[in-house]
């Protein structure tokens, strides 16, 4: 099993920045890919960004390209989501999730952290 704990959420003004962290523990060697998702009130959960644990290759949804940066620090067993130029529409609960090699879906989820951007 892998346990994920997010931190770093909060209230920020539009145009501001936040960095989310996702600390992993347990069977860390199981992690192949880490993704960040968000869910705004009344909306479906959506994929935001992802990073392959082995080589750091990344993927972003179009709405955050150029503003969000996903990364990981293997030695710290931690993933990060750096967010700049935040907009009101970025307001949501943000979740990190992880999957093992060969998995068809994300197997492990964090508890979520609230990000609120005031306009």
Image: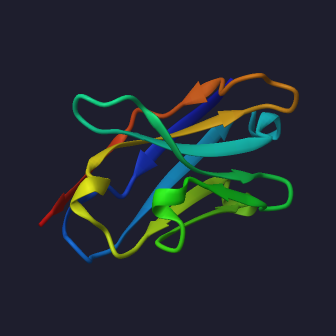
Which percent across, then down, holds residue 107? 66, 23
In the image, 98 versus 59, the foreground residue is: 59
Q: Horizontally, is 107 left or right of 68 in the view?
A: right
Residue at coordinates 71% horizontally, 59% vertically from top-left?
58
Residue at coordinates 28% horizontally, 38% vertically from top-left?
40
Residue 71, quarter of the rendered image: bottom right
Q: Horizontally, is 44 left or right of 87 in the view?
A: right
In the image, 4 versus 69, the foreground residue is: 69
Colour style of the rendered protein structure: rainbow
Which percent across, then down, holds residue 25? 63, 39
Residue 73, quarter of the rendered image: bottom right
In the image, 50 versus 63, the foreground residue is: 63
Q: Compared with residue 102, is residue 66 higher up or lower down, i.e. above or below? A: below
Q: Compared with residue 98, is residue 23 higher up or lower down, i.e. above or below? A: below
- Total marks in image: 0
Residue at coordinates 47% horizontally, 62% vertically from top-left?
64
């Amino acid at each position: 099993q892998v346990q994920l704990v997010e931190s770093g959420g909060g209230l920020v003004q539009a145009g501001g920045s936040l960095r989310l962290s996702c600390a992993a523990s347990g069977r860390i060697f199981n992690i192949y890919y880490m993704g960040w998702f968000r869910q705004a009130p009344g909306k479906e959960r959506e994929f935001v960004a992802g990073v392959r644990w082995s080589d750091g290759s990344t993927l972003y949804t179009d709405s955050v390209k150029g503003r969000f940066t996903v990364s990981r620090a293997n030695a710290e067993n931690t993933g990060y989501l750096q967010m700049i130029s935040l907009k009101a529409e970025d307001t949501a609960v943000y979740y990190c999730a992880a999957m093992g090699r060969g998995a068809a879906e994300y197997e492990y989820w964090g508890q979520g952290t609230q990000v609120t951007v005031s306009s």
